[in-house]
Image: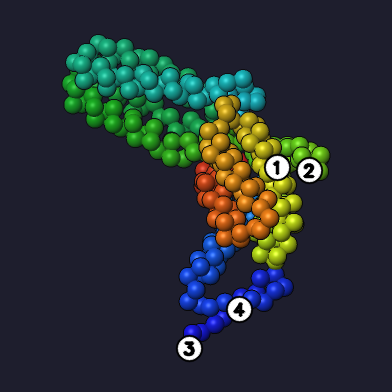
Amino acid sequence: MKKSGSTLVGNQLETKKFKDPDVRKENEMRKTSAILIGLFVATVIFLVGAAREPQAAGKQPNAISLPASLDAFYPPQSGQPVYLMNMLKMETFFSGIVADIMENDIQGARDSYDAFRSQYLTILEMVPEWKAYYPVEPVERLGAQLKNGDPGSVMEAFGNVGRLCHECHLSTMVPAQQKYHWGDFGAVKISDPLSRESVDYTLFKKYLATNFAGISVNLGQGQTEQARKQFAGFRERFKTLKDACQNCHDDEKKYYVDSDVEKILDRLDKALSARTVDPGAVGALVQSIGQQSCSKCHLVHVPAAMARLKVQ
């Protein structure tokens, strides 16, 4: 005797055979889609919390505080990332020392060192709170070894200065990137095409997640017309989401919201517009959107948003 089981879909109780491969495949597809939608909604809830947590809680317990004086060297207070530009200039001279040594150009190495030392002392004065990261003695020792001209001694002294750079970068580079490079999602405003209201980015993503979840939920409940309406809302907001990328990105995005994802949306539109909607086909397309767009975008942006909470 073959065993049978019951599955509850919305308010309808259906009896299926456990060994029916098509049923198992459809159920697994629904489960996978539900998991992806759940992850998408949970991610949006996190982003909403991430944008509002600092105001609500006041402080993050393990927040990293960057010196206030550093703000003067980054937008919006400065037109350019002046501190970063000076650091890159210094690094060029520093690496130039090794390039010259490898070419047996000791005088060139001394010239590169002079330029490096000058830049080092300039940066040392830019952020008074960070002077401890810029001890002068190891730099002077490197200059002394260059005067002696012994490549082995020069490289040893070079390594000691390099370790200072590494230790400073471990403490300050990532927090600075999080504060000055990664934008604040909560500060982005979007014109919602459905409500016609200007809403913050995180609330907009919550609306988008609701539409996305509504497609599968309504279809699973046998409410096909409601699923179509949720898809229509999702697609309108997805178009707006693509435009919203320009709040942070200067160039057109070629992924997450590109033509490949649009083609999947076209196929989903066609599947939902059919006289008889195939839940399995719709579930597969919803899963594909979750994997190719939502999940991949979140893998890049959520860690940055989470890390940014730890920087003040």
The amino acid type found where label 1 is placed reads Arg
Sequence-wise, the earlier of marks 1 and 4 is: 4
Label 4 to label 2: alpha-carbon separation: 39 Å
Sequence-wise, the earlier of marks 1 and 2 is: 2
The amino acid type found where label 3 is placed reads Met
Label 1 to label 3: alpha-carbon separation: 51 Å
Whether the residues at callouts 4 and 2 have beta carbons within 8 Å, the answer is no
**Disc 4 designates what residue?**
15
Q: Can residue 198 be seen in this view?
A: yes
**Disc 1 designates what residue?**
237
Q: Measuring from the top left, give residue 163's x and y in whole percent.
A: 34, 35
Q: In which quarter of the image is residue 77?
A: top right
Q: Measuring from the top left, give residue 115's x and y in whole percent.
A: 38, 14
Element at label 3: loop
150 relative to 167 in the view: left or right = left
Element at label 1: helix
Q: Measuring from the top left, give residue 64's x and y in whole percent.
A: 56, 44
Sequence-wise, the earlier of marks 4 and 2 is: 4
Whether the residues at callouts 3 and 2 have beta carbons within 8 Å, the answer is no
Q: Residues within 10 Å of mark 2 (few under 14, many from 20)?
A: few
Residue 194, disc: 2
**Disc 3 designates what residue?**
1
Sequence-wise, the earlier of marks 3 and 2 is: 3
The amino acid type found where label 4 is placed reads Thr
Label 3 to label 2: alpha-carbon separation: 54 Å
